[in-house]
Image: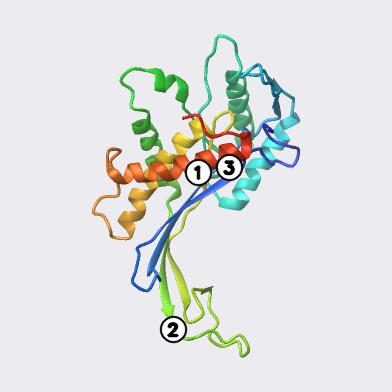
Amino acid sequence: MKRGVNEKGRVANDVETEQIVFEDTPDDIPSQITSVVQHRGSIPLVWFQETSRLNIRPEITLKSDVDYKATRLHFENLVLRYGNPIVILNLIKTREKKPRESLLRAEFAKAIHYINKGLPDDKRLKFLHMDLSKLSRRKGTNVLGLLNKVASDVLELTDLLHCEITISSKPLDASSGQGSCDIKINDDFCAATMVPLLLQKGVLRTNCIDCLDRTNVAQFAYGLAALGRQLHVLKLTEEPKIDLHDPLADDLMDFYERMGDTLAIQYGGSAAHN
């Protein structure tokens, strides 16, 4: 039931999603594994909404934060967790008859601009804005196609994790310290080495107002773009792209819908709206 950021730079509805892909093998021990991480979280400004059963769109109240200290702490924490670049995908409304979301949109842009002035070029926050509500109402606009293009561009910046796993059949011997390894697979096998062929650097951070419905759509689009690349580096597909009409896209959407409902129930008490 919270919104925004606290004085320590922690935001409401802060969720890390990791999409892991590997090929099934007869012995259940993959030789390669791929992973992509993305992040969602409330807009990192000091703001509030009064909860009301009668008003489905409660007023948004912004509170002053000198030098955007809490916002700065939030992004410093993201850099510690993920490295650079930090790419922000902001999905809230740009213009409204009665300003609500647009107030946050303008203040968020000011905060990013202010923070970036004190950062070197290669560590500046990358701010992308897409008014998803407006785009989805525009005739002839393929919203998922646009989001997929954004996702592909971001993946060019961040890349993904791709590891090669070499299996040792030597049993673990805790008493002697011999035969120890990085990852224990089961009682008889261990992964002696996990060699990274690719590493993810930085992260995509997506938000709307409550970081549920619109964010779910954008995170699915990013997951689909990532899945195409993951299958490609595993040499399971010839092209690093999955068409939106591919049955595999429907399967992935089911995953993201279930995740979205789970997060909505956890954060707001009911399933996602769309």
Q: Residue furthest bottom?
A: 176
- Asked if residue 102 shows in the view, the reply is yes
Q: Amino acid at mark 2?
A: Ser
Q: Which mark is residue 259?
A: 1
Query: 245 and 142: which one is in front?
Result: 245
Binning the other alpha carbons within 10 Å of mark 3 as few (below 14), some (14 to 19) or many (20 upward) gives few
The image position of residue 84, as x and y in percent, is 54, 48
Q: Amino acid at mark 1?
A: Met
Q: Quadrant of residue 55?
A: top right
Binning the other alpha carbons within 10 Å of mark 1 as few (below 14), some (14 to 19) or many (20 upward) gives some
Q: Earlier in the sequence, mark 2 or mark 1?
A: 2
- Which is more foreground, mark 3 or mark 2? 2
Q: Is residue 245 left or right of residue 201?
A: left
Q: Secondary structure at mark 1?
A: helix
- Which is more foreground, mark 3 or mark 1? 1
- x 23%, y 54%: residue: 238
Query: 197 and 174: which one is in front?
Result: 174
- Above-or-below relation of 94 to 29: above
- x 60%, y 52%: residue: 81
The image position of residue 7, as x and y in percent, is 76, 38
Q: Pointer 3 and pointer 1: residues touching (CB < 8 Å)?
A: no
Disc 3 target residue:
120
Tell me the distance, in whole angstroms, between the alpha carbons under discs 3 and 2.
48 Å
Q: Earlier in the sequence, mark 3 or mark 1?
A: 3
Disc 2 target residue:
169
- x 61%, y 17%: residue: 100
Q: Earlier in the sequence, mark 3 or mark 2?
A: 3
Tell me the distance, in whole angstroms, between the alpha carbons under discs 3 and 1.
36 Å
Q: Amino acid at mark 3?
A: Pro
- x 65%, y 34%: residue: 44
Q: Secondary structure at mark 3?
A: loop
- Above-or-below relation of 44 to 52: below
